[in-house]
Image (cartoon, rainbow, N blue to C red):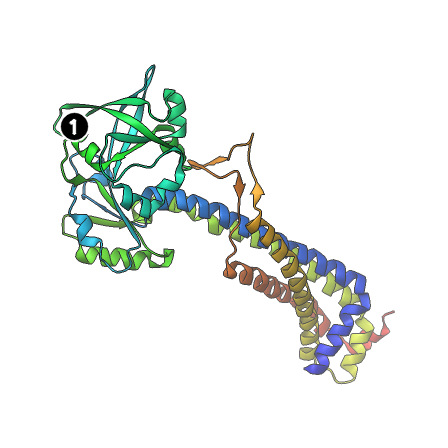
């Protein structure tokens, strides 16, 4: 085997220019694949933080009828929060009360989604206070304040300290109205919340909707994505029979389907690398076999078996792939570092791009997953070796006498 490796390595450098061009083309494909996967992982990671981390949570608790009907009176007692707060695997937990109403400023009014929260719990779950771009976060005690989205503030022409009026209908059919002071303006990245969303202290919204000590949902997060299923089972174990417990992908299959496009994009990138690697190796190995027909015939006449000829060609393609992986890994690592540290500016007119209801940051930073790098490099080696099967098979079928006659 050592002899075959030595011969294969020398054969690669007999046509050094061709070998270097092929390896360089494969390396560029590897580097581009690594960098694009890192970029897509960063983009989908940002979308996951907004759509799942802020909106859905990893695990949800609802009244069994609430997800399908979204009616005000389909509530859970606020005490369910204490039932699951000490469950193992719970990293963050927040109860919410949801509803809709009409919010008016001095000159105009807009339909809004009202979300009642416990400020400290919500901040621990979604880090909402970090998204306040003007003013201050809600106080722990109810003070008839509200935080509104930045686009909603523009539509209402209100600023910090202004008073807005909310008109809505309570769960008992009565009309509810309240004057609230705008304490903060936020930018969450969720288009719907930034354009028509308002956060209130949960006690204020409970009074407005006439739903004392009631919540519509409890959102729970796990320390990592891998712990979501086990967390859901733990919560189901302590929850009452009249409480619906779902993971985020069970409660919102559309979002789950959209997030699965992350894997599809990785497959597309790998498909590009497969094509470059396969065509490059196939061309190089076929040319090598054609050029060395007499040499291969001589080797077979000296006792080299067809199996050893196949091994020789396969080893050449393997060494070529390893060389491409080394070059591509170095170049791809440099590109990954730049994308992770500096990011790519995808802004349009100085603003972030909107995608699937999420306003992405103008500069998108990548995320590097070790499995993505291993999969890319491993795929190049496997495809390169597979692409060499036909040239190896052709070389193994050469007849020594006929091969040695060729010029």
On-image quarter of the N terminus: bottom right
**Residue 299 versus residue 254 in the image, above or below:** below
On-image quarter of the C terminus: bottom right
SS class of the residue under badge 1? loop
| Left or right of residue 71: residue 318 | right
Label 1 belongs to which residue? 170
**Residue 2 versus residue 336 in the image, above or below:** below
**Residue 407 versus residue 219 in the image, above or below:** below
| Left or right of residue 151: residue 4 | right
Residue that lies at the very extreme toward the left in this rendered image: 172
Residue 1 seen in the figure: yes
Task: Report the front residue among 146 and 112.
Answer: 146
Q: Residue at horizontal 14%, vertical 31%?
A: 210
Q: Residue at horizontal 63%, vertical 61%?
A: 329
Q: Quadrant of residue 324?
A: bottom right
Q: Position of residue 367 (x, y in %)?
A: 51, 52
Q: Position of residue 127 (x, y in %)?
A: 36, 45
Task: Report the front residue among 69 and 195.
Answer: 195
| Left or right of residue 59: residue 371 | right
């Amino acid at each position: 085997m050592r002899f075959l490796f030595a011969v294969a390595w020398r054969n690669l450098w007999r046509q050094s220019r061709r070998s270097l061009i092929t390896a360089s083309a494969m390396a560029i494909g590897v580097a581009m694949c690594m960098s694009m996967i890192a970029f897509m992982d960063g983009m989908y990671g940002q979308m996951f933080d907004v759509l799942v981390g802020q909106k859905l949570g990893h695990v949800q608790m609802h009244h069994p009828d609430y997800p399908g009907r979204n009616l005000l009176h389909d509530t859970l007692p606020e005490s369910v929060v204490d039932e699951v707060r000490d469950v193992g695997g719970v990293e963050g937990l927040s109860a919410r009360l949801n509803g809709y109403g009409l919010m008016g400023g001095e000159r105009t009014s807009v339909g809004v989604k009202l979300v009642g929260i416990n400020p400290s719990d919500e901040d621990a779950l979604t880090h909402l206070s970090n998204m306040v771009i003007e003013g201050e976060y809600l106080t722990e005690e109810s003070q008839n304040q509200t935080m509104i989205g930045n686009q909603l503030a523009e539509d209402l022409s209100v600023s910090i300290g202004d008073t807005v009026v909310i008109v809505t209908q309570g769960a008992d059919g009565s009309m509810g109205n309240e004057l609230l002071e705008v304490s903060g303006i936020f930018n969450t990245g969720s288009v719907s919340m930034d354009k028509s969303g308002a956060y209130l202290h949960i006690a204020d919204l409970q009074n407005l909707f006439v739903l004392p000590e009631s919540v519509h949902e409890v959102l729970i997060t796990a320390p990592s994505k891998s712990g979501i299923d086990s967390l859901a089972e733990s919560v189901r174990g302590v929850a009452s029979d009249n409480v619906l417990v779902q993971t985020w992908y069970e409660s919102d299959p559309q979002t789950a389907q959209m997030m699965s496009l992350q894997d599809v994009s990785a497959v597309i990138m790998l498909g590009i690398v497969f094509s470059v690697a396969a065509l490059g190796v196939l061309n190089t190995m076929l040319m090598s076999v054609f050029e060395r027909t007499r040499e291969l015939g001589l080797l077979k006449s000296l006792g080299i078996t067809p199996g050893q000829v196949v091994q020789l060609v396969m080893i050449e393609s393997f060494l070529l792939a390893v060389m491409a992986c080394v070059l591509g890994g170095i170049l791809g690592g440099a590109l990954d570092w730049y994308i992770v540290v500096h990011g790519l500016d995808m802004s349009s007119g100085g603003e972030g791009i909107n995608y699937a209801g999420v306003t992405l940051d103008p500069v998108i930073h990548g995320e590097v997953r070790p499995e993505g790098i291993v999969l890319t490099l491993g795929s190049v080696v496997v495809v390169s070796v597979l692409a060499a099967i036909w040239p190896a098979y052709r070389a193994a079928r050469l007849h020594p006498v006929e091969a040695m006659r060729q010029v």
